[in-house]
Amino acid sequence: MRLGEFLEHARRQIAAAEVAGFDETGFRVQGRLHWVHCARTGMYTLLMVHPKRGTEAMKAMGVLPPFAGVAVHDAWAPYDTYTGPEHQLCCAHALRELQAVADAGRAGQWCWATQAAEALTAMQDLVREAIGQGRGAVDPATLAAQVRLFRSAALAGASQTAARSGALMKNTTRWPAACATARTTTRGSPPTCGRRLTTDNNGSERDIRMVKLRQKVSGCLRTFTGARQFCAIRSYLSTAAKHGLGVFDALIMLTKGQPWMPAAA
């Protein structure tokens, strides 16, 4: 397969981007759990399969170590070990967890999670409005008011959320109250305050979706080589689609031994 040059080009472009999304998902290869890692921008997709989920795989992928832009992700701890980038929490993850906390509360009572979610949504709207109107920044006073609401709610959540106790809670990474308070209180600023930033990491989830569909339809990959080839082809086709090239045309070029390459930036 002649995609080595393409994959290296995609890696360099994502590593040099102002903003990039990162995600990972489980993938069974040779009867064992592996991980497909995704790094992406609006124009490039790079997928890589690796036996590990954490920093060992991220280092092998070669995007995060040199990356100096804004890394958008779900706040999984290994991402935060990279201090070169700025880190942007995926607001979609935060809002889902805050909603879960609010749903578990008592009807008619004030809930810190509801206040945090409303403030977060308001900040997203302020950023979108500023971009739509061509303004270089959000009104500082309006933003500051929402930041105060967000932070006070997060602090209230931290004070009302008991520490995890027992094996079940400690091993349940999606325990809503603990997750929501951890994500909202460990960030130096609310998740969306800059024009460069995207409000969520949904693009990464879309780019990685075909991995889950492949596994659902056909089961695990029999060989690691086959898994690597699958990820390479998906990286190629996803990037081609982002550049306006049809999948069929991209595949024809690949089978002829002359894979499509994006124009140099």
Image (cartoon, rainbow, N blue to C red):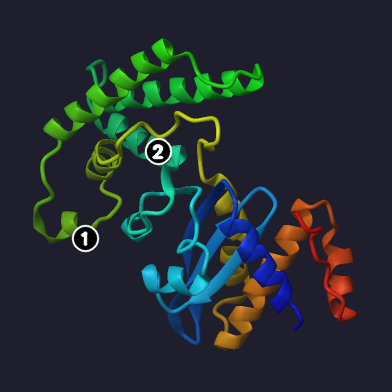
Q: Residue at x 53, y 21 (%)?
A: 137
Q: Residue at x 51, y 40 (%)?
A: 200
Q: In the figure, 127 relative to 51: above or below?
A: above
* 214 sits to left or right of 49: right
Q: In the figure, 226 relative to 18: above or below?
A: below
Q: Residue at x 41, y 17 (%)?
A: 143
In front here: 204 or 20? Answer: 20
Q: Residue furthest top?
A: 141
Which mark is drawn over residue 171? 1
| x and y, in percent, of residue 170 in the image | 17, 57
> Crowdedness of circle 2 by 10 Å Cα count: few (<14), some, many (20+)?
some
Give the residue type at disc 2. Answer: Arg
Which mark is drawn over residue 96? 2
Give the residue type at disc 1. Answer: Asn
| x and y, in percent, of residue 209 in the image | 59, 58
> Crowdedness of circle 1 by 10 Å Cα count: few (<14), some, many (20+)?
few
Q: Residue at x 30, y 36 (%)?
A: 188
In front here: 237 or 264? Answer: 264
Check disc 1 and report its element: helix, strand or loop: helix
